[in-house]
Image (cartoon, helix red, strand yellow):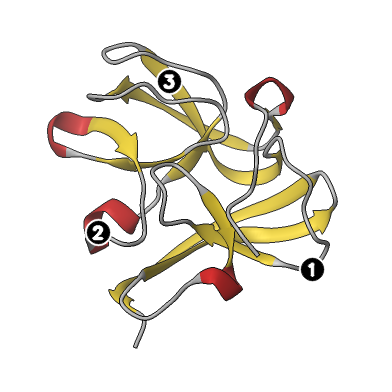
Amino acid sequence: MADLVQTAANVLASGSFRSAICGSVAIVAGNTVYVAAGNTVELCENDQTAVEAACVGIAVNNASPGQPIQYSVGGSMDVGATLVIGEVYCVGAAPGSIAPTADITTGEFQTVLGIATAADALKVSISAAGVASA
């Protein structure tokens, strides 16, 4: 499998949200984000560091650097892509991406985002392992 192909316009969420300021790069609805220095949010990726893989949520709106952004931290979410029911989804290797857990390879950090409960619904429940896969 591969990273999800998402359509930002189709991202919808209900549940718990947090707000932050977008960091150094633009964020698109559906991107995974982590808290960086200065309390801004940046795009997650699982193949760099434990910090960059430690997702805090999934963006629910687009934001340019320095602009406010909201992200989902729990609840049900349409991430703008077709999901496989029962599949566990994680932070992907590409910046901001979401991938099925089977795509995590040696040396990548696993951060679970949630489980698909329908073809258009991810039950968001984030858990970062903080260690690279062996």
The residue tagged 1 is: 86
Q: Which residue ends up furthest to the left in the rendered image?
A: 38
Q: Where is residue 43 drawn, in percent x and y? A: 35, 39
Q: Do the CB atoms of the residues marked 3 and 1 lie less than 8 Å apart?
A: no
Q: Of helix, strand and loop, which one carries label 3?
A: strand
Q: Nearer the viewer, mark 3 or mark 2?
A: 2
In the image, is residue 116 above or below residue 12?
below
Distance between the alpha carbons at the discs numbered 3 and 2 = 23 Å
Q: Amino acid at mark 1?
A: Gly
Task: Out of 119 and 129, give the one closest to the viewer.
Answer: 119
Distance between the alpha carbons at the discs numbered 3 and 1 = 29 Å
Q: Where is residue 36 drawn, in percent x and y? A: 21, 39
Q: Of helix, strand and loop, which one carries label 1?
A: loop
Task: Out of 19 and 78, give the one closest to the viewer.
Answer: 78
Q: Which mark is residue 28?
A: none
Could you tell me which residue is drawn at 43 percent across and 20 percent down? 69
Q: Do the CB atoms of the residues marked 3 and 2 lie less than 8 Å apart?
A: no
Q: Of helix, strand and loop, which one carries label 2?
A: loop
In the image, is residue 108 above or below residue 28?
below
The residue tagged 2 is: 48
Q: Amino acid at mark 3?
A: Ile
Q: Amino acid at mark 2?
A: Gln
Task: Out of 134 and 69, give the one closest to the viewer.
Answer: 134
Q: Which mark is residue 69?
A: 3
